[in-house]
Image (cartoon, grey):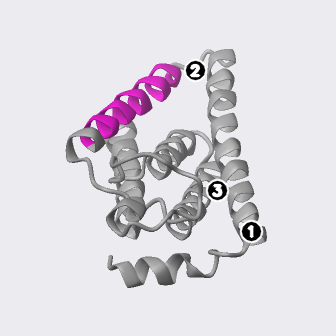
Amino acid sequence: MTREAYIRITGRLRGNPRRIRLLEAVNRVLTGIVFFLYPFYLCRLFLDKDPFLLRAVVVPAVSFAAVSLFRQIFNAKRPYEKFDIPPVLRKDTSGKSFPSRHVFSVFMIGMTVFKHYPGAGLMLGAIGAALGAIRVAGGVHEPRDVAAGAAVGILCGAVGYYLI
């Protein structure tokens, strides 16, 4: 991504506090929905004595740790660092942009839930896509970061739940 592309993507929000507040609110609400549903789903598996519970915890945990380690080693700069322009969404993290861990987490959880509730898993995928768009529009990730986060989340879920 170029500096001009970054400015074009985030430009409609810059200087418009109302739009920024709305973007931040939607970001929080969507993230909250996902991180409420996952423990709820795990409780449901526990109460049903479903043997899938162990995999529903281990696969996302191992995948999350692997993505976090990769991000730390790869340490890609965030758009606001590369182009020395403040992000629209409040963020002060340096590096660790690729892949987006927010988007990865939503897609990983979506794959986990999909195993028992395909409709809910697809809904989480839609939320993941919306969060990806928000993270790019907010200037904290490049499109490649969110695309990679989604792809890795889907891949980890497919391997962890369908191939192993």
| Disc number placed over residue 17 in the picture, else none | 1
Instruction: Name the quadrant of the N terminus.
Output: bottom left
Which residue was labeled with disc 2?
50
First in sequence: mark 1 vs mark 2: 1
Residue at the (40%, 51%) spot, across then down: 154
Q: Nearer the viewer, residue 121 or 148?
A: 148
Residue type indicated by callout 1: Pro
Residue at the (37%, 46%) spot, across then down: 158
Residue type indicated by callout 2: Asp
Which residue was labeled with disc 3?
123
Q: In this picture, which residue range is highlighted in magenta?
A: 52-70
First in sequence: mark 3 vs mark 1: 1
Can you give x and y, in whole percent of width and height, for residue 97 in the image? 36, 52
Where disc 2 sits, the SS reads: loop
Q: Is residue 164 visible?
A: no
Residue 62: in magenta span: yes
**Cβ atoms under marks 1 and 2 closer than 8 Å:** no
**Disc 3 packing (10 Å; few <14; some 14–19; many ≥20):** few
Residue 24 drawn above or below residue 96: below
